[in-house]
Amino acid sequence: MRNSAMPEPTVSAPQRPWSAADFPDCSIAEDAIIEASVVEMGSGSQIGAGVRISAATIKIGTGSRIERDTTIGGIHGPMTSFALGDQSMIGFANQLLTSKFSMGDYGQLHNNGLHSGYEALTIGHNCWIGQQSILNCTERLAIGNNVRIGTQSQLWTHVASGELLEGCTLFGQKPLALEDNVWIVGGAVISPGLTLGRNSIIMTGSVLTTSTEPFHTYAGVPARDVTDKLNFWKPQSIDEKAARVSEFISEFVAMYPQHEGHICVAETASDVVNANAGDVIFLRSVEDWSPAAAAGVSLFDLTTKTYLKQRSAAEIDWIRWSVGYRARFVPRDF
């Protein structure tokens, strides 16, 4: 069940407090403060003790949680909008102060982080951000899908400590973009104005001052391209991916025996028609999604790495189990 009220407001629209009484299928601590004009909260969501959220619009997906003592709002008042996807988590004691924030499904923003600025901070699906990290959005900070950012990393969109009157030129602010599947291993510093290419890896403790190439590895202070020494990617054919997912499924059903017989790699699209609602099916390539949609089947495409979200128990358990390091899929946007 989802609860909502009133049309989309501006940030200056009147706000009112919301409580557990407004969302009987969610868990909201008595001392949590939720102030907004519009709130939509999915079933099973949890808001911890001491949490404060102030935004014109708030949208929290099913099964997501915001842990204790986290503050969410704007720099000088409420956010314009705050959106958290399904099955996502914002850890305890985070300071999240931006004009606009969104994070997709199955994301984890761990504890004691400082994430602030005047522009939007957007984070895709399946992202993991370690504790005590800094995400600065003085300018726009855009983080793609499946990105991993290790503990105590710093992402900056501005530098502004020198005194201009004395001629300091170390001043400026520029957007920062991380494409899909970027991995910042931990303790790294990322400079403003860069684009980190998809599947690039930034090794521990690096200071990155240049944009990166897809599938390349960078290390050092300042960080240099070290792909010739450290190359962590190898090509995978579609048949190899199908075989690997079959192996994963065997591991998965050993841990979740209730889903045995309800998750498989199918050889043909006709297998989808014969599936039952709540089943999870992988195909090498999907040409027609409509049979799965009609049958209530969670269909995963190994070519595009997208899936049809049905929120079944098997789908949620599979993604929670696989998203860490085995396989990451993004919900299809129809």
Image: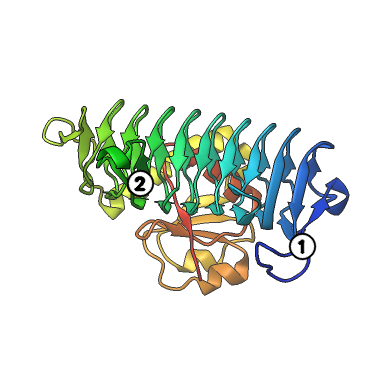
Q: Is residue 33 visible?
A: yes
Could you tell whether 237 is left or right of 296 in the image? left
| Extreme residue in the front direction | 165
Corner quadrant of residue 293 = bottom right
Q: How many marks?
A: 2
Could you tell whether 24 is left or right of 304 in the image? right
Looking at the picture, which amino acid does disc 2 mark? Asn
Q: Closer to the camera: disc 2 or disc 1?
A: 1
Query: Relative to 204, is 142 above or below?
Result: below
Label 2 secondary element: loop
Residue beneath disc 1 = 14
Identified at 75% across, 61% down, the residue is 37
The disc, 2 or 1, on the residue closer to the chain's N-terminal end is 1
Q: Is residue 179 visible?
A: no
Label 1 secondary element: loop
Q: Residues within 10 Å of mark 1 (few under 14, many from 20)?
A: few
Q: From the top left corner, tell me how far across and down residue 147 is, in percent.
A: 40, 44
Q: Quadrant of the N terminus?
A: bottom right
Identified at 65% across, 45% down, the residue is 64
Identified at 24% across, 40% down, the residue is 167
Alpha-carbon span between mark 2 and mark 1: 39 Å
Q: From the top left corner, tell me how far across and down residue 266 is, in percent.
A: 44, 57
Q: Residues within 10 Å of mark 2 (few under 14, many from 20)?
A: many
Could you tell whether 277 is left or right of 327 in the image? right
| Extreme residue in the left direction | 228
Looking at the image, do the residues carrying marks 2 and 1 touch, with CB atoms under 8 Å apart? no
Residue beneath disc 2 = 181
Q: Nearer the viewer, residue 74 or 40?
A: 74
Looking at the picture, which amino acid does disc 1 mark? Pro
